Image: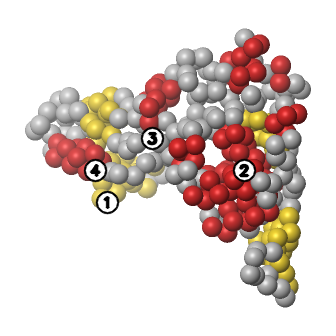
Amino acid sequence: MTLDILKQSAIQWSYIYKPKNSNVRYHVVNTCPIDTSLQMIYFLWLRQFVPHSIVEKDSLLLKALNNVRKRDYNKARHEVIVERSLPHRVDVCGNVENWNCEGDFMDYKAFPSLFKSNGPIYMTWGDCSKMGENCPFHNYFQYQSRRSMTVKSKPKLHFMPDPRKKETFQERIYLDFEVNLCSCKKRSPIKVANNEAEDGVPVLNEFCYCPENGMRQAHTTASFSSCPWVMTFCGEFPNYSTLNEIPKAVLMPPKTHYFLASIILYDGGHFIGLSLDVKILKEFT
């Protein structure tokens, strides 16, 4: 993180806050998860990784970022914790409430506008390979496809390609949504015992299978354009002492339009965030 950008914002862990027109004073500790997440999101916005048009869709997010910019960190954090019901333990002592906000960095998902897919995602299925439209499950899959197409919600995409692997976003999407040739089956409303047994106990079938053991090709509308503005991935990576030691394929994965914009580290007790400036990193490639 460059010194100039660090001067823009630096949130201290824990805070004491008394809202306007309130008699309650809040003593809040262990805020490093929301502090780190909010700070990283602020730098994503400040460095224009995320368009302002996306941020302003969430009034709380916009208000929180503006409060961070004004260095009103206590108000920014407090409003997010309260309005998005982030988990915290409470101990009341008169007009003082002691909050313990120990949690994890996934608290940043209090801002869904950044992490939801850009459009509805649904699945469709082809005809049975053995029985075609005569398959007893034909109407079931036709209904599932039509029903899914009416979904208006924007589901979250929880995956991110491991930058050390040579896989495209579309390949990862196909893997995540199980887009392949699969058995023609549907979930059974009741589990029925089959002819096999384990230790004398009948094995229950969770699915009903096509009489001819046919196959169906699954399809999804998810693509790169469905991906949200901000995605995350977790993993075990080697210990890097300096930014220059991180492989460029990790900082700027090839064949994608995504860049590694921030790193959040956790030592079992505290979190720390590193905001990366892609414009500067490009000079080293």
Distance in Å between CA atoms under marks 2 and 1 = 46 Å
Neighbor class of circle 1 (other Cα within 10 Å; few <14, some 14-19, many 20+) is: few
Residue type at mark 3: give it: Asn
Pointer 2 and pointer 1: residues touching (CB < 8 Å)? no
Q: Is residue 248 left or right of residue 13?
A: left
Q: CA distance from mark 4 to mark 3?
A: 16 Å
Q: Earlier in the sequence, mark 4 or mark 3?
A: 3
- The residue located at (50%, 26%) in the rendering is 169
Residue placed at 67% from the left, 69% from the top? Answer: 82
Number of other residues with Cα within 10 Å of mark 2, as a class: few under 14, some 14 to 19, many 20 or more: many
Pinpoint residue 34: horizontal percent, then vertical percent: 74, 55
Which image quarter is the N terminus in? top right
Q: Nearer the viewer, mark 1 or mark 4?
A: 4
**Mark on residue 190?**
1
Compared to 72, does 69 lie above or below? above
Would you name the residue on which mark 4 appears?
A: 150
Mark in the foreground, 4 or 2: 2
Q: Nearer the viewer, residue 68 or 209?
A: 68
Whichever of callouts 4 and 2 sits on the residue coming sooner in the sequence is 2
Label 4 – label 2 distance at C-alpha:
34 Å
Q: Residue at x 88, y 33 (%)?
A: 3
Mark 3 / mark 2, whichever is N-terminal = 2
Residue 196, position in %: x, y?
A: 37, 46
Mark 1 or mark 4: whose residue is earlier in sequence: 4
The residue beneath circle 3 is: 118
Cα–Cα gap, marks 1 and 3: 37 Å
Residue 117 or residue 1, whichever sits in front: 1
Q: Residue visible at 80% across and 63% down?
A: 74
From the image, tell me which residue sits under label 2. 38
